[in-house]
Amino acid sequence: MERTFVMVKPDGVRRGLVGEILGRFERKGFRLVGLRMLRIGRELAEAHYAEHREKPFFQGLVEFITSGPVVAFVLEGPNAIAEVRKMMGATHPKDALPGTIRGDFATTIDENVIHGSASPEDAAREIALFFREEELL
Ligand SMILES: Nc1ncnc2c1ncn2[C@@H]1O[C@H](COP(=O)(O)OP(=O)(O)OP(=O)(O)O)[C@@H](O)[C@H]1O
């Protein structure tokens, strides 16, 4: 059984897509093991996106992810990391197929609605950044 970290970004929350997105993962059969709504601070944003620190879009990315509440959650299930990324669709919505979350709900790369861990190492790091052990049930 594998766990992954997922986050509905500020654009998804603002647009009222939380229920739709959580519902897709629940209907697929993943188990929700942790859930919180929060406004990300600059420090957490920079830690979460540390791998992109040198990229030209880093400042914009931090501004965006701190611009409003996000909904962060942990899902558990077989191959959860890869399956969730499949359901999210490609990072750039222009490449995301209809039927995926980004394919159905996003048009631009800077506001692409959802984040999901890319690897087991990322999942462990991101879950620990957002949740205490006792918050995962
Ligand atoms: N060229 C870009 N311009 C603006 N934002 C970008 C660009 N490339 C990536 N991003 C933003 O940075 C995030 C992380 O990029 P990454 O390449 O890790 O994609 P990802 O792993 O599919 O996305 P995420 O980490 O959000 O799940 C993207 O989701 C997007 O919001």
Image (spheres, grey):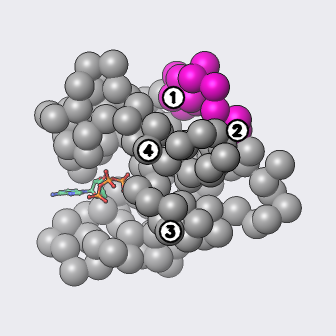
Instruction: Estimate how packed mark 4 is, as few (under 14), some (14 to 19) or many (20 or more) residues with alpha carbons within 10 Å.
Output: some
Q: Which residue matches tag 3?
A: 121
88 lies above or below 61: above
Label 1 sits on a secondary structure element that is helix
The answer to whether residue 23 is seen in the rendering is: no
Q: Quadrant of residue 88?
A: top left
**Real-space CA distance between mark 2 and mark 1, rounded to the nearest whole angstrom:** 12 Å
Which label belongs to residue 82?
Answer: 4
Instruction: Estimate how packed mark 3 is, as few (under 14), some (14 to 19) or many (20 or more) residues with alpha carbons within 10 Å.
Output: few
For residue 94, side relative to residue 128 (left or right): left
35 lies above or below 98: below
Label 2 sits on a secondary structure element that is strand
Which label belongs to residue 21?
Answer: 1
**Real-space CA distance between mark 3 and mark 1, rounded to the nearest whole angstrom:** 24 Å
What x and y, as percent, mark residue 10?
44, 46
**Mark whose residue sits in front, 2 or 1:** 2
Q: Which residue matches tag 2?
A: 32
For residue 100, side relative to residue 40 (left or right): left
Label 3 sits on a secondary structure element that is helix
For marks 2 and 4, the one nearer the N-term is 2
Label pair 2/4, CB-CB below 8 angstroms:
no
**Real-space CA distance between mark 3 and mark 2, rounded to the nearest whole angstrom:** 20 Å
For marks 3 and 2, the one nearer the N-term is 2
Indicate the amino acid at tag 3.
Answer: Glu
